[in-house]
Amino acid sequence: MTQEFITRSSRAFTAWAILVVCASLLIGCSAIRLGYSNGETVAYWWLNGYVDFQPEQKPWVKKHIDNLFAWHRSTQLDQYARILARVGQQLDHHVTPAEVLAEYDGMEKSAMAVVDKALPQLADLALSLDGQQIVHLEKKFASNNDTYRKEFLRGDVEKRQQVRFKKVMKQAEYWFGDFTREQEAQVRAASDVRVLNNEMGLQLRMRRQQEMVSLLKKVQREKPSREATMALLKNYANGVLNQFGDKEQQAYAQASREGAARMAAAIINMTTAQQKANARKRLQGWIEDFHTLSRRD
């Protein structure tokens, strides 16, 4: 649950982890929130929107996605259920930002485990893309960036803070239920003290996109081996995690993460016994869903 407050993504912490990781590796997207039970179909549809699969690619891409989800269900979901159970236990005491960050670090490691499992299939996909598909990807990136500008780069600081606060409240209410006006004011204060630099956020997005396009063009041009392509993709995934070594972007990302962790802890600690009970009930529902999905044939 804390991950919902630290980042816009639900990577590796939620039932959509595998789709998010594949997407993050392929296109640097971190804002996918889609259902898992029909995740194979959703993953194919979503990826197709970015690369526009050719008829000959569709059967094996679908097979790869099916196999990856089968592995994920059988090996990862019970682990996620254990994480959620631990988070539920943490609600019984005062939560610190350090505890939130520790959970995030564990989730990040889980995400990289999925990346490692997916690398052979992602390498096959990268090797199969042609120039037209890479152009299609670039156009999709440009469209997404226009949407980002419209949503996050308009208005003054107050408007941008308000937009961000509303997103936080939506997540908080999902987990805990209704908040009083006094609590909402506290959430707004905790939200506003976080670093706010949407321009830098756009720069980070565009850097991930540019690195991915450059990688795919290199693969198309040089046609490296599958193993070499896997190495390129793994380097890209690691680059995403450390902002490709850019010191300014690293500092911004770290400040954002730490600020969000402080906010998450503040929100959890301000909730009442009833609100915590609501969160435990929500968590238990997810735990049961994970266990059910893990046993799906």
Image: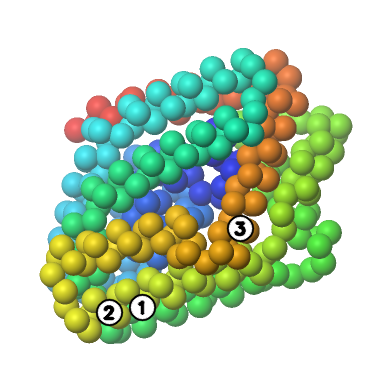
Dot 1 alpha-carbon crowd within 10 angstroms: few under 14, some 14 to 19, many 20 or more: few
The part of the image, by quadrant, that contains residue 111 is: top left
Mark 1 near mark 3, Cβ–Cβ under 8 Å?
A: no
Looking at the rendered image, the quarter that the C terminus falls into is top left
**Identity of the residue drawn at 74% across and 70% down:** 154
Tell me the kind of residue under disc 1.
Ser
Residue indicated by mark 2: 218
How far apart are labels 1 and 3 at the CA level?
Answer: 24 Å
Tell me the kind of residue under disc 2.
Lys
Mark 1 near mark 2, Cβ–Cβ under 8 Å?
A: yes
In the image, taking residue 208 as reference, residue 277 lies left or right, namely right
Residue 152, position as x, y percentages in the image = 68, 65
In front of the other: 145 or 173:
145
Label of residue 251 in the image: 3
**Identity of the residue drawn at 64% across and 34% down:** 97
Foreground tag (1 vs 3)? 3
In front of the other: 243 or 219:
243
The part of the image, by quadrant, that contains residue 279 is: top right
